[in-house]
Amino acid sequence: MSEPAASTSGRAASLWTRGSQLLLPTRIPLRLRVFFRGAFALLALATVGLALSVLLEEKIQGLQAYTQGFAKTLGQISARLRHPTGQLALLNPAMAPPPGVGLRPVVLPFSAIDFDDRTKVQQAVEMAGCGVRYALPGGQEAQLCVAIGSSPLAGGFIYAVGSVPSPALVARRVGERDLSAAHRVRVTLQMRGQTSRWMAPFEAPTEPPAAGSSLAQRGRLTGFVEAEDGQTADKPVRDFRGWLWRDLRCLGPLPGAVDMASAASAASVGSAAEPEDCLRQAFFSVRLPVEVFRDDLQTRRAQIVWPPQDLDRMLLRVQVLPPGAESAPLFDSAQGEPTAPFSLQALQSLLLPGETLNIRTANGAQVAELSGHAPPEPSAPLMDALIRRLPVEGYDTPLVARETITTSLGRYELTLTGDVRSVNRQLSVVATRVAGFVGAMLLAVLLTWLAIELRIIRRITVLTQRAALVSREVKGPTSEIRLDVADLRGADELGLLAGTLGDLMQRVNDDVRREHLRVQQEKDQWHAVGHEIMSPLQSLMVLHAQADDPSHRYIHRMQQAIKVLYGQASPTEAFEATTLGVQALDLMAFLRQVAQNAPHAGIERVHLDAAHDAPPLWVRADEYALEDAVTHVLTNADRFRHPGTAIELRCVLTAQGVEVQISNQGPGVPQDLLGRVFDYGVSQDTGAGREGQDASHRGQGLFVARTYMAKMGGTITLHNQADGVRVCLGLLLA
């Protein structure tokens, strides 16, 4: 090799040696991996921590808001129950009107009603809220309140107060026996197995309403006891008192009327003498005498129980009848679906989920127990468990508040119990909705991390591993540096770097390949020179054939040097011209000696598959040539076997003679080399040799083995096995 070539090769080797020091790591540096992954892990933890801190703060604020709202709730309930409407609900916890049978009397928060004064009666009924509403045809509405006073000392009476839309009232003439000719009110009372009926016709006073009054008509309702067959008593009931007032304001046209203009003009005049052609609100107030109540009051004044215990079993039916025996009633409390007034059940809407309101009397009797409820909203079980575990001070303290309501019939104790777990449920519903956004943020962090890992970190790792492999190949026996970066090329910085490295490796490989060709040409040239020198040396040897000639000694030394350096003309011709001395050879003894001497030749773990006392097996072979051929095959088997595995020698008798099988465990021979692996110059140099072996192989060993086997009349073949390669040497029996 010339000096410039050696200098170029040395500079390339020095360059790649310095580069390999930087490319030796096969992975991204630990600090860089920790930095990237730690940054994304901290970002994910920060997102989760932010969500947890928000949930914790919301839980604390929710607990505070719930505690404040809990006290406000009890205050609202107490205010509602202190109002006459609330006291009516307290005094009558089960006052829902049964449909189709009439109304049950309720206990008023007042001792009695001034039923003779229309304004006072209306104010008392509206303030107590005892009116039950009925929907009438034509979009009109009627109202009825059936009640008793809270004090039995005011007399045992039942009050029936109501209003109904009505046309012009027809009054009963004094002394008229036929009550059906006038507007009238029929009252039916069922209590304690008895039924009482009253018929009260409308009787107009002799003087008309005063000028400027808001009433179109007013009059008394005179009560007569009515029998089951419809006959009424001759004399009115003395304690039956009732009044009927009809407003001046027009509510709407009469059923079947079409002339709205006349109705409007009639309403604008304000005179009671005008023709009645529209509906007006009629308000009635009736006080019914109940003999049973009065008897109890007189006989058991000190021990009387008020309100009566059977009050919820009493039924009162009120009918407002127009003139005519067969006419349909203007109003019937036993028809339609009445709308109940305010009751204790209405307080349930003020209660939050988990709150319980317990109402008891002063003696401990249960009046009502209400629990707040809300339609369930979807929440994730995981969110429920997470929110329950968030630590909040004072969260486990039970919430209980008490209040006392005083009525005319006694005191009532209110106990409101709160459940702070409702804060969890409400917060869990909100957290379930927000969890989607938090999950989206975590997913975005994960996708960004995966994009960096797969798009940048993985490509850097692959490039680093391949560069490290290049550094090992530079130190190995290979003559070509392989760096495949086709899958890493791209438009980004890393892709441009990979492409530049790939182009640089291709240029270096081209330079190394040209250098090898130049060196091979020089070697062939020197072989030719050596061949040409051998001819003159042969002539000189003839001229100086005498052993005592000093020139003979020097010429012989020169001839031996030329043979060692360049061989005879060419290696192929030298091997083919060799003559072997074939004779009988004990193959078993020969193979034992080869297996024993193999470690001295650097080939470890060569095993002969034969017994120690196996009989001699005589074949035709040259001992030295056969040893040379077997040694070359063992050397190749040693190069390509897996580390730690053995090379097996075995003798097999065949129809043609004896076959020596040499097997190793390792990679197979490529298919494109099977047909020419025994040719001169063909070598599968993979750099797999052990450290210290000569890594520059010329494909000469198997060529020598095939040549020697042919000269001894034998054969040599190679076969790929499942776990390695087997070489078979065929010899003839002696």
Image (spheres, rainbow, N blue to C red):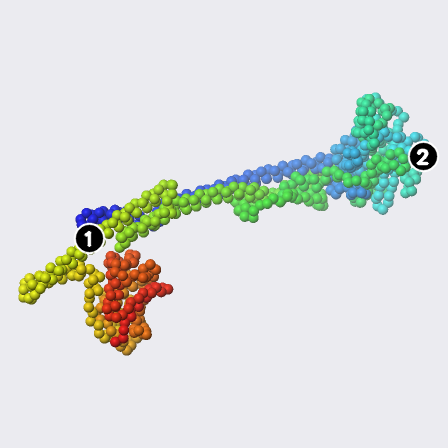
The picture places residue 89, in percent across and down from the top left corner, at 73, 39
Q: Crowdedness of circle 2 by 10 Å Cα count: few (<14), some, many (20+)? A: few
Q: Tell me: 191 left or right of 339.
A: right
Visible residue check, residue 407: no
Q: Secondary structure at mark 1?
A: helix
> Which residue is nearer to you in this view: 261 or 575?
575
Relative to residue 192, is residue 629 depicted above or below?
Answer: below
Q: Tell me: 615 left or right of 332.
A: left
| Residue assigned mark 2 | 177
Labels 1, 2: front one:
1
Visible residue check, residue 365: yes
> Which residue is nearer to you in this view: 214 or 711?
711
> Which residue is nearer to you in this view: 345 or 626?
626
Q: Secondary structure at mark 2?
A: loop
Relative to residue 716, is residue 357 depicted above or below?
Answer: above
Q: Residue at x 28, y 62 (%)?
A: 678
Q: Amino acid at mark 1?
A: Glu
> Which residue is nearer to you in this view: 207 or 300?
207
Q: Amino acid at mark 2?
A: Arg
Mark 1 → mark 2, Cα distance in angstroms: 156 Å
Q: Residue 357's mark?
A: none
Q: Residue at x 86, y 37 (%)?
A: 328
Is there CB contact under 8 Å for labels 1 and 2? no
Relative to residue 620, is residue 120 depicted above or below?
Answer: above
| Quadrant assignment, res 361 | top right
The quadrant the C terminus occupies is bottom left
| Residue assigned mark 1 | 522
The picture places residue 661, in percent across and down from the top left corner, at 31, 69
The picture places residue 718, in percent across and down from the top left corner, at 31, 65
Sequence order check, earlier mark of 1 and 2: 2
| Quadrant assignment, res 174 | top right
The picture places residue 310, in percent across and down from the top left corner, at 80, 45
